[in-house]
Image (cartoon, rainbow, N blue to C red):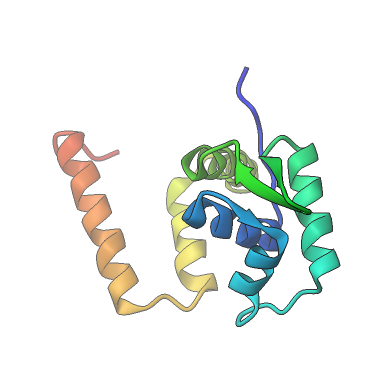
């Protein structure tokens, strides 16, 4: 059975700190996020505790502090969340991939570099499929 992860933007920010560091205390996570998102230490502690209850983190005690570490990989969380997005998009666009891509390109400010990367991905996929087009 495949596990499904659904995280908020804030939860993802905390997880990114832990994926990058492999393990960290509440104070270390708070410090890593301070510049972009100042949070109270109690808020960070609560969020980490909730992530642990969801099975995304574990902790060990070092002195008087909990040291948290991820129990799931970033790739697994991304795969799960993209899968959920794909299911939602399938329902919204009724399987029309072109309509989905068109919406994404027109609903967002897309920079030239991003467009070039999308084109390269499409070209690579076309090569994989032997140039087949539907």
Quadrant assignment for the C terminus? top left
Quadrant of the image containing the N terminus: top right
* Number of residue marks: 0
Q: How far across and how far down the image is residue 132, in percent?
A: 20, 36
Residue at 64% in and 41% down:
91
Q: Residue at x 25, y 60 (%)?
A: 119
Q: Residue at x 15, y 41 (%)?
A: 127
Q: Give the residue furthest to the bottom.
A: 35
Q: Nearer the viewer, residue 41 or 78?
A: 41
Rendered view: 30 above or below 91: below
Quarter of the view holding residue 9: bottom right
Furthest residue toward top: 1
Quarter-of-image position of residue 18: bottom right
For residue 28, above or below residue 122: below
Q: Name the one closer to the observer, 40 or 103.
A: 40
Give residue 102's position: percent from left, percent from top.
Answer: 45, 62
Q: What percent of the width, then of the height, locates residue 86?
A: 55, 42
Q: Is residue 95 left or right of residue 25?
A: left
Q: Is residue 41 above or below residue 72?
A: below
Question: Percent from the top left, x then y, of residue 50?
Answer: 81, 47
Is 67 in front, or is 8? 67
């Amino acid at each position: 059975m495949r596990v499904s992860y659904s995280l908020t933007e804030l939860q993802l920010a905390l997880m990114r700190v832990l994926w990058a560091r492999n393990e960290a205390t509440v104070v270390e996570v708070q410090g890593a996020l301070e510049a972009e998102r100042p949070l109270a230490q109690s808020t960070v502690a609560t969020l980490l505790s909730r992530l642990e209850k969801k099975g995304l983190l574990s902790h060990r005690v070092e002195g008087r502090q909990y040291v948290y570490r991820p129990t799931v990989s970033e790739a697994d969380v991304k795969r799960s969340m993209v899968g959920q997005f794909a299911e939602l998009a399938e329902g919204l666009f009724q399987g029309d991939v072109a309509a989905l891509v068109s919406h994404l390109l027109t609903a967002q400010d897309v920079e030239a570099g991003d467009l070039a990367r999308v084109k390269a991905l499409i070209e690579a996929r076309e090569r994989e499929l032997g140039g087949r087009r539907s």
